Image (cartoon, rainbow, N blue to C red):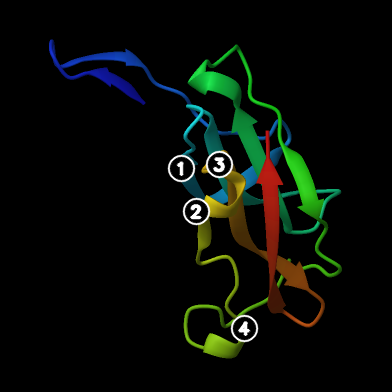
Amino acid sequence: IHIDTATRVMVQDVDVTLVGGYVYFPALTIDRGGNLWISYTSSSATQTASSEISEVVGGHFGSSIGGYVYFTGPGSVSGCSGYATNPDQRWGDYSGISVDPGQNDRGVWAATEYGEAGCHAGTEIGAFHS
């Protein structure tokens, strides 16, 4: 969302989506170069829950935002029951992203969850820069 704080008018609103799939638990940050970074979990009928990241260079949105799957989940969480009551079977409750001071604040570290066989989850961490 881009809001002009002087006029209190929304300039732009963007949805993060995956055609034919789903996006879960996004986290965002902006680096020193003005690039917007979004980390999230994504899945579809043909892709298990996986770790994904998108970069919007200079914060200038086009008609779509491409993503990069940086870790493909090795197992499906489809049909798993008990997520609400069994903490051992929970996945996808969070993603995190932070500007990387080691890249002069022009890169990020991202962490997202992915699906593993047996109704479990793993966490993948990656470093990215423009």
Q: Amino acid at mark 1?
A: Thr
Q: What's the distance in space between the residues labelled 4 and 2, CA to CA?
A: 27 Å
Tell me the SS state at disc 2. Answer: strand
Residue 115: x and y in percent read 74, 68
Q: Nearer the viewer, mark 4 or mark 2?
A: 2
Q: Nearer the viewer, mark 1 or mark 4?
A: 1
Can residue 77 be seen from the camera position used here?
no
Tell me the SS state at disc 1. Answer: strand
Tell me the SS state at disc 3. Answer: strand
Q: What's the distance in space between the residues labelled 1 and 4, CA to CA?
A: 29 Å
User: Which residue position is annotated with label 2?
Assistant: 98
Q: Residue at point 47% right, 44% down?
A: 28
Q: Does residue 118 appear to the left or right of 54 in the view shown?
A: right
Q: Residue at point 57% right, 78% down?
A: 90
User: In the rendered structure, which disc, 4 or 2, sits on the residue that comes first in sequence?
Assistant: 4
User: Which residue position is annotated with label 1?
Assistant: 29
Quarter location, residue 17:
top right
Q: What's the distance in space between the residues labelled 4 and 3, CA to CA?
A: 25 Å
Residue 48: x and y in percent read 80, 58
Q: Amino acid at mark 2?
A: Ser
User: In the rendered structure, which disc, 2 or 1, sits on the residue that comes first in sequence?
Assistant: 1
Cβ–Cβ below 8 Å for labels 4 and 3? no
Cβ–Cβ below 8 Å for labels 2 and 1? yes
User: Which residue position is annotated with label 4?
Assistant: 89
User: In the rendered structure, which disc, 1 or 4, sits on the residue that comes first in sequence?
Assistant: 1
Quadrant (top left, top right, bottom left, bottom right) of the C terminus:
top right
Residue 30: x and y in percent read 46, 37
